[in-house]
Amino acid sequence: MSIFDKPFDDANHRALVTGAGNGIGRSIAQALTGEGVRTLFADVSAERVEAAVAGAPRPELAVPWVGDLAKREQCDALLSFAANEIGVTTHFVHSAAPPRKESDHSLAVTDETWETMRSVNVDAGFHLSRELAKPLIRAGRPGSFLFLTSLHAGTPRNLPHYSTSKAALAMLVKELAKTLGQFQIRVNALVPGIIDAGGFVADPSMVRFIPVGRIGSSDDLVPTALVVLSDRLSGYVTGASLVVDGGASLTNWFDAPSLGRDI
């Protein structure tokens, strides 16, 4: 039998995916159900998460949850719901991120927008992963966590709230991987390139920055996500950042924002 035939143990594996209502999070969550993994679809939008569940290959394995992860009490509500509905979470994917506007450059972004982006990306990611790790440690069970970071964890994006939160998340992956490795809990990052998904509409002209010659889709991330989440396929991989960008990281395509002096 090929090692690719059964990458997950459908009898014992349970997954929680944030941002599962659209974009990359939705594609990964749906793919996990297709692999036989009971998966909790968490999202801030009831309409989106219901549609994502309905579109899953095996909707009977999809469990919806709606809440705002910018609020700590909602993070705790999600953890309690997950424990009751799916049991011990063995696979965690943190894809949730607030929408971003190109106008929110360094001189325009509001304190509220800054705080919300950090709260969802970093604070919720840290809190959820730490609390999900504890039952695994107590039970002596392995786990696999995957964070969606960004090419702009290392290069400016003209969106300081977004790029700095992704940079923090990239380091959080390394910190958690180093600490949790002793318990056989692996923590990795998936680094998307120019992906037309999750509310981001890519300008078609950006193709000139992509060596493979096309804008990416959320489905382009799924095979790599499943491989790195699988203990059978990637059991010796932790603290890694896996770039899926069609080669876009070979250049930095954003110029500084054009601003006048009347600010």
Image (cartoon, rainbow, N blue to C red):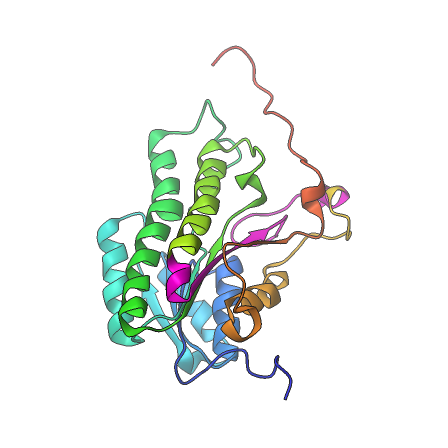
Can residue 53 be seen from the camera position used here?
yes
Residue 6, relative to residue 88: is it above or below? below
In the drawing, does residue 67 fall left or right of residue 152?
A: left
In the drawing, does residue 9 fall left or right of residue 207?
A: left
Can residue 99 be seen from the camera position used here?
no
Q: Position of residue 191 (x, y in %)?
A: 57, 51
Boundaries of the magenta span = 180-208
User: What residue occupies the far top of the structure in this picture?
Assistant: 261
User: What residue occupies the far front of the structure in this picture?
Assistant: 182
- Give residue 94's quadrant in the image: bottom left
Q: Position of residue 60 (x, y in %)?
A: 41, 82
Q: Residue at x 23, y 66 (%)?
A: 80
Q: Residue at x 46, y 49 (%)?
A: 174
In the drawing, does residue 144 fall left or right of residue 1?
A: left
Q: Is residue 188 magenta?
A: yes
Residue 96, relative to residue 27: is it above or below? above
Q: Residue at x 36, y 62 (%)?
A: 46
Q: Position of residue 226 (x, y in %)?
A: 55, 69
